[in-house]
Image (spheres, rainbow, N blue to C red):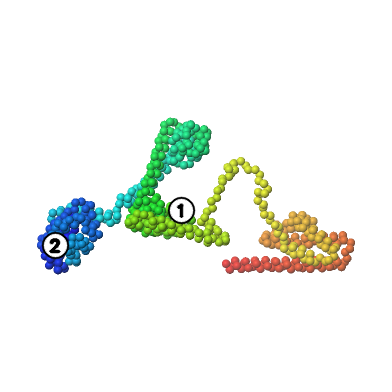
Amino acid sequence: MLVLFETPAGYAIFKLLNENKLTEIENLYHDFDTPEAACKVVKLMHFEKFADTAEALAATTAAVEGKLCKSLKKVIKRHCSELQEQLAVADVKLGNAIKDKLSLSCVSNTAIQELMRCIRSQMDSLLAGLPKKEMTAMTLGLAHSLSRYKLKFSPDKIDTMVIQAICLLDELDKELNNYVMRCREWYCWHFPELSKIVTDSITFVKTVKIIGTRENAINSDLSDILPEDVEQQIKEAAEISMGTEISRDDVLSIQRLCDEIIETSEYRTQLYDYLKARMMSLSPNLTVLVGELIGARLISRAGSLINLAKHPASTVQILGAEKALFRALKTKKDTPKYGLIYHAQLIGQSSMKNKGKLSRMLAAKASLATRVDALGENENFDLGVKHKVRLEARLKILEERNFHSISGTGKAKAKFEKYHTKSEYIQYPAAADTTLPSAKRKHSEIEKKVLIEEIRNPDEEIVKKKKKKGIDGSPEESVATVLAEEETPTSKKKNKKGIDGNPEESVTKVLAEEETPTSKKKKKRTKTENVEGDNLKHEEEAEGKTIESEPGTSGEQLKKKKRRKEKDEEIEEVTNEETSENITSKKKKKKKKKCDE
């Protein structure tokens, strides 16, 4: 029986000297303990060495797939077909392929597998013509080549180029910003009005390069860079510029800086086109979903495309926000909802309320797309387009749900306005800059002050109502009461000012108020009692005068009026006593509360 043994260096054909050894599989390894013992069981007949690593890789891949390669076919035809013996093969598929094409009987069972293991253990001694260092080098080279073949490796799938390109692109953006800022500050000493007229950075640099000094602005042609109206503004501003004069050497150094900025910006556009093409070849599905720049930044942050494919969707969602995540975990606050993925186009289209939901959905689809790009065999972007359409439909539903859920209540409108800001164009009032005193305001602009209504005494209102009720049907009495009511307010005003008909009474009132150290409430009571007494006296005098002036009044009518007055006085005394009792009871209650406390 012949044994076909495959090695990284080539094919070896051994002759099995004693076939009875295969019956004792359990003790077969004892026969291969030493090289001398192994030589008594098997003997090397032929060794076919591979010419290079490519041939070794082709032979190995064919053996893995169970196919018969050309080099193995030639070896078997030369050394095995003439002997017409059985051939021991490790792989069943390979044995079937040899049997079909070369009509040789092949054997592959557990005994043959154990024999292969024993030969592999003493391979260095059995293959005497092959050095050990060369064998290890061949093994390592074949292993690397086979792993690349299994992963369908191609030069277009090199993600390191994308990582380097995106890092260089970010650095170029920073450098360009610094150079443009330096150029603006430098040239604005000479022509400060230009930076306000031309806001675009690259256009400003090109304008500075063409103009040079501001004296040349009138004769220079800027039609290729700027529109006509802007060009005219620059020429007018150059004539009345407030900048300082600079020398020819200064202008040349500024123009050299402008050349550097223009060259760097052109190289930046070329690098961006290169990055776009590389991303479409490396991961087309991820590029369709999130864009070239964000996809490249995700790959750069993860380290490689394979590492990004290993990350779960939750990690892809917050990739780039590691500082905020660990800060939130440390302070026990809310973790961030998005990282680098926040700058994607789909999340930018959504409202603030739905950004968290959409970032979670986009991260899930992006992780699937990355795994397809890294480990899949197809190089199209159908999956990315399909997921993007679904996400756009979901975003539309979410945004429409916000509009439908709003009711007519003010509460719901306030919630809606919280997330949807109103764009208002507010112009700055130029009149606010003046320091001169403003003109007098119109009467309509002055805020009307709220007038304080005079508080009337409730006792006086009660007395007036009762007097109105007590008036009979006779017109003479009604006239007398009206005259008395008209005279009472004048008497009240005089009493407040202290200018009554009796000066002695007013003086006594003032002295009493100064001498009594009682509380404010007692002072108020004494004042009200004095005022009421004076008012009653004045009313009696007024009524007496009116009655005397009227010729038709009889004695019975006078008696009736006196009785009514007496009743009114009794009612007033009762009301005053009730109010005083209420005040004393309240004071007692307050004292009790303080004592309890």
Sequence-wise first label, 2 or 1: 2
Q: Quadrant of the N terminus?
A: bottom left
Report whether residue 292 is seen.
Answer: yes
**Residue 404 image position (x, y, % from top left):** 53, 61
Task: Compare residues 294 and 156 and report the one nearer the observer.
Answer: 156
Eyeballing the image, is 334 above or below 433?
Answer: below
Task: List the residue tagged with mark 2.
Answer: 84
Residue name at image x 55 percent, y 59 percent: 413
* Residue under the point 17% across and 60% down: 4
Q: CA distance from mark 2 to mark 1?
A: 75 Å
Q: Which residue is found at the position 27% from the left and 55% from the top?
A: 149
Q: Is residue 327 visible?
A: no
Helix, strand or loop at label 1? It is helix
Q: Looking at the image, how many numbered discs can be counted on the residues? A: 2
* Viewer-side residue, 561 vs 377: 377
Q: Which residue is mark 1?
A: 348
Element type at mark 2: loop
User: Could you classify mark 2 by the number of other residues whose Cα lies within 10 Å: few (under 14), some (14-19), or many (20 or more)?
Assistant: few
In the picture, measured across the screen, residue 472 lies left or right of residue 258, that is: right
Say if mark 2 contacts mark 1, CB within 8 Å. Answer: no
Q: Is residue 249 left or right of residue 231?
A: left
Q: Position of residue 187 (x, y in %)?
A: 45, 36
> Residue 18 lies in what quarter of the image?
bottom left
Residue with the most extreme right position:
551
Near mark 1 (Cα within 10 A), the count class, few <14, some 14-19 or many ≥20, is few
Q: Amino acid at mark 2?
A: Gln
Question: What residue sits 48% from the left and 39% below the top?
Answer: 226
Q: Amino acid at mark 1?
A: Gly
Quadrant for the C terminus, please.
Answer: bottom right
Q: Position of residue 407 (x, y in %)?
A: 55, 61
Residue 185, position as x, y percentages in the image: 45, 38
In the image, which is nearer the foreground, mark 2 or mark 1? 2
